[in-house]
Image (tube, helix red, strand yellow):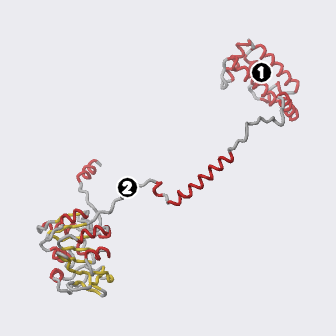
Amino acid sequence: MVLAVLLSLGAETTRSGPLEPNNPGPEGSRALIEIMRQRGTGVTIARDTTTAVTAARPDTLLVVASSHRLLPEELERLADTPGDLLLVLPTTGAMEELAPGVRTSGDTDERTLAAACDLPAARAAGSADTGGELYAVGGDGATTCYPDQGGDALVQVPRDGGVTTVLGSSGPLTNDRLDREGNAALALNLVGDRDVVWFLPEVPAASGEKDIWALLPRSFYLAVVPLGAALLLLAVWRGRRLGPLVAERLPVVVRASETTEGRARLYAARRARDRAAGSLRSGLIGRMRPALGLGADSAPDAVVEAVAVRSGDDPARVRALLYGPESGPDDDPHTADDAALVRLADELDALEKRLR
C-alpha cells in the first residue's frame, strides 16, 4: 500500500476526452502532438478563446475541436484571427462564422475514403479514415476531397488572410487510428511547416451556485401570497376574543368519599379482597416513606427495617403486615375473609399512629 501511494504521488495526471492533446487513450491526440513536436513544430495548447486568439498568427494553423462549447461571440473573435483554420466536426454555427458557404450534406458509414482530389496534402496521403460527416460547398475557390455519395469529407475554402479546412471525422487525428491508412500523413501534410495552435475549449463552468429559493419558479411566490393571507385570516378568525374569559361550573362534583365508597363497593361485589388489601398497604407505605426519610423507589427491605426501628415491632411481623407473606397472596391470612380484611385495616391504622 505504501508503494502504491508513493507511485500515485509521482504519477502524471492526464486529461481525457476526444482530441485531448494530453490524452494517451484511443480517442486522444497525444501521439500526433508528440510527433509534431519531434518534427520541430511549435504546438500551443489553448483551452480558452483568449489564449487561442492571442497565439494565432499569420504563419500558424489554428485547430478548432469541440466547437459546440463555443458561444457565438467567441466564434466571432476566432473569425478575426489571422492564419489558417482546421475545423474538426464543426457545428453549423461554427461553419457559418468560420467557413462561409460550407454546409452539411449528409454522412457516410464508410470509414476509409479515397482522396480523389487535387489537394496536394490529401493526394500525397492517399486513402484515410475520413468517413463521417459529409459537406457541400458553394462558390469559387473551394477544394473538396474524399468524396462519397452526398458530399465530401474534407473541404477547403478561402478566408481573409488564410484558408479554412473542414474535416468531417476526427479519425486521422486520434491515437488509435494515426498509424492506419494515410491518417498520419494527412494530418502532418495539413499542418505543413507551420506552428500549430491546438484549441480545445474547456467545458463551460457554472457562473455561480444558486440556492433553493433561486430555483423556485415565479408562480410559487405568486401562490404564497394568497396562501399567507388566508392563513392570517384563519388565525384571526379562530383566535378572536369578544370579552374576558368566563369560568364555567363543572356539571357534576363528586366528593372524594363517594369515589372511595364506590371503589369499595366494586371490590366487595367482585370479592377482590386481595386488591383491597393491596390498596390499603400501598396507601400506608406511600404516606410513611416521607416521614421515614425514604424515597419513592426504596426497596421493601429498607421500608421494613425503618418501620421496625421506629415502631419497635418485629421486622417479620411488619413485613407480613405491609407486603403480605413471602409465599404469595394466596397464603395471606389478611384476605381470607372480610373480617380478616377489617383486622388488616385496623392494624395498619394502629401502626400508622405509632409512627407519628
Counting the numbered discs, the total is 2
> Farthest residue in the top direction?
312
Query: Could you say which disc has been placed on residue 156 in the image?
Result: none
Give percent across and percent down for residue 83. Answer: 17, 72
3D distance between C-alphas at marks 1 and 2: 81 Å
Q: Which residue is mark 1?
A: 321
Give percent across and percent down for residue 310. Answer: 71, 13
Is 207 rendered above or below residue 3?
Answer: below
- Residue at 88 percent across and 34 percent down: it is 269
Secondary structure type for disc 1: helix
Which quadrant of the figure contains the C terminus?
top right
Q: Which residue is mark 2?
A: 208
Is 323 rendered above or below residue 227?
Answer: above
Question: Looking at numbered disc 2 in the image, what kind of residue is underneath it?
Answer: Gly
Q: Is residue 235 visible?
A: yes
Q: Is residue 111 visible?
A: no
Give percent across and percent down for residue 342. Answer: 86, 23
Which quadrant of the figure has residue 202? bottom left
Q: Nearer the viewer, residue 210 or 64?
A: 210
N-term-proximal mark, 1 vs 2: 2
Q: Nearer the viewer, residue 246 or 38?
A: 246
- Residue at 66 percent across and 18 percent down: it is 293
Residues marked 1 and 2 touching at CB (< 8 Å): no
Which quadrant of the figure has residue 315? top right
**Image position of 26 (left or right of 235):** left
